[in-house]
Image (cartoon, coloured by chain):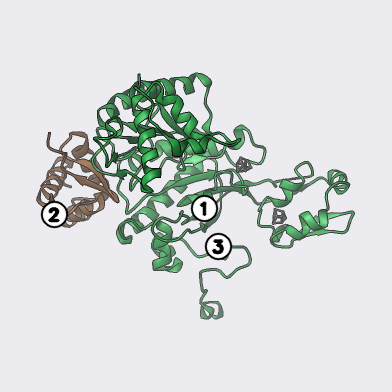
Amino acid sequence: MATKEEVAEAMFNMVKEYHGKKNLKALDLTKAMIEKFGDEACDKKLCKKAIRELVDNGKCTYSYVGGSYIVLPPEE
Amino acid sequence: MAEKLRETPLLDELEKGPWPSFVTEIKKSAVKNSMANDQLGILERSYKDRIGHWKHGGLVGVMGYGGGVIGRYSDLPEEYPECAEFHTIRVNQPAGWFYTSDVLRKLCNVWEKHGSGLTNMHGSTGDIIFLGAKTEALEPVFADLIDMGFDLGGSGSDVRTPSCCCGQARCEWACYDTMGFTYNLTQHFQDELHRPAFPYKFKFKMAGCANDCVASVARSDMSIIGTWREDIKVDQGEIAEYAKTVNIADDVADRCPTGCISWDGKTFDIDNANCVKCMHCINVMPKALAPGDEKGATILLGAKAPIIGGALLASVLVPFVEMGEENYEDIYELAEEIWDVWGEHGMNRERVGEFIQRVGMGNFLEQVGLDPEPEMIMHPRTNPYIFFELDEEED
Ligand code: SF4
Ligand code: SF4
């Protein structure tokens, strides 16, 4: 099983990569991580924890643009 | 302290007449709060220009939460600077909307300290709504609310703040503890409430009986409505009393949606096997009739108000569930199963009811792992969604 931190890091990289190009939902990140790590090593529960970690430590934040997306926080 | 009150000749028209006026209430706040004063000004401007001057959405919220704050900005920030940012805060209301006057006073104090002082008790989702916060006020409001034991509600693509009727706290018709269940459900789905992860919003509403005082059948993705299984309790003596003042044939028997009541002027009889527990007869003669024993709830799915597509009413998903605390987990599992399927195949901004319409109830049930049942209908005595395979029966 992958660790929460590994998945959070991979999610963060994905959000960075898509920044300004495409808004990603929690579900998009979850599907991508399960594909990346394989369903033996990563599941929805782990992804949920990883998203929580990302948002709680301020690396990402939620944005609402018609739906809710996970994005980089605004630059100070 | 606000400066001079904004001129509002158009809004003033809404103060004329015998009804209470929201304009009068905003003016009361505007005297002491400059945000409310500018809000009055921009509203007058909207009436004059015949266009709303608000934009909504964006990156506002409190740390860690993806819901509970709806970003709102004016497109005339120079002219109405005090309401350039005018975010809405949703506060999770107590189940059944019970307050002490002390709590109401404290909520108002928090809001007068940090925001416009304007509230909406309650919004369409059921929450306590604080209207008009600047971005810098969000964290301090949140901290004060937490100190009082309150939390933010839902917004965006998450579980919206669950709401319920007053249930057994005040109503003799409640077939289950709506408030207890709502509290439990709110605690259970904290993550889903604060961290949006769905294709779109998902609302739970709990009603203790089919009178559905929270309009769950029209307003929630999953509505849980109290019902019963045993025969309706009939007191023939009280029926005889009602017969003196109520036209039982016209107003009760003829209005039974399934025609399962017979009344010969003396004896009132119900064919309980055909009763759909709509509550009509009980509402008309509450001293003579009462819900039967073996109480529980019906779970319905798929209602929504018209936003993107048209309005949908919920349809029956599980005809009967027991509603003791030991049964709550089953309902949570069902909800999670539904979210998995909807999350996997639902389109962005597609409500679960729209999703079911798109994929078909039969396919949906198969994915969720529920067996079709004849009660899975939108209205009594109409065709079910499911076409049972004739050859299966013949085998
Ligand atoms: S929905 Fe039924 S139980 Fe709830 S308050 Fe209304 S009448 Fe009472
Ligand atoms: S509850 Fe409704 S369906 Fe049942 S007997 Fe009364 S009116 Fe008829």
Q: Which mark is residue B293?
A: none
Which amino acid is tagged 2?
Lys
Q: Which residue position holds label 3?
A: B378
User: Chain under label 1?
Assistant: B
Compute the Cα span from label 2 to label 1. 37 Å
Chain shown green: that is B
Element on which disc 1 rests = helix
* Closer to the camera in the image, B277 or B319: B277
Q: Which residue position holds label 1?
A: B218
Q: Mark 2 vs mark 1: same chain?
A: no
Q: Mark 3 vs mark 1: same chain?
A: yes
Compute the Cα span from label 3 to label 1. 12 Å
Which amino acid is tagged 1?
Ala
Element on which disc 3 rests = loop
Element on which disc 2 rests = loop
Compute the Cα span from label 3 to label 2. 42 Å
Q: Is residue B137 above or below residue B383?
A: above
Give percent across and percent down for residue B279.
68, 50
* Closer to the camera in the image, B392 or A17: A17
Of the 4 image quadrants, the one containing the N terminus of chain B is: top left
**Relative side of B272 to B366, left or right:** right
- Number of residue marks: 3
Image point (37%, 43%), residue name: B46
Q: Which residue position holds label 2?
A: A21
Image point (33%, 46%), residue name: B156
Say which colour chain A has: brown
Mark 3, mark 2: which one is toward the viewer? 2
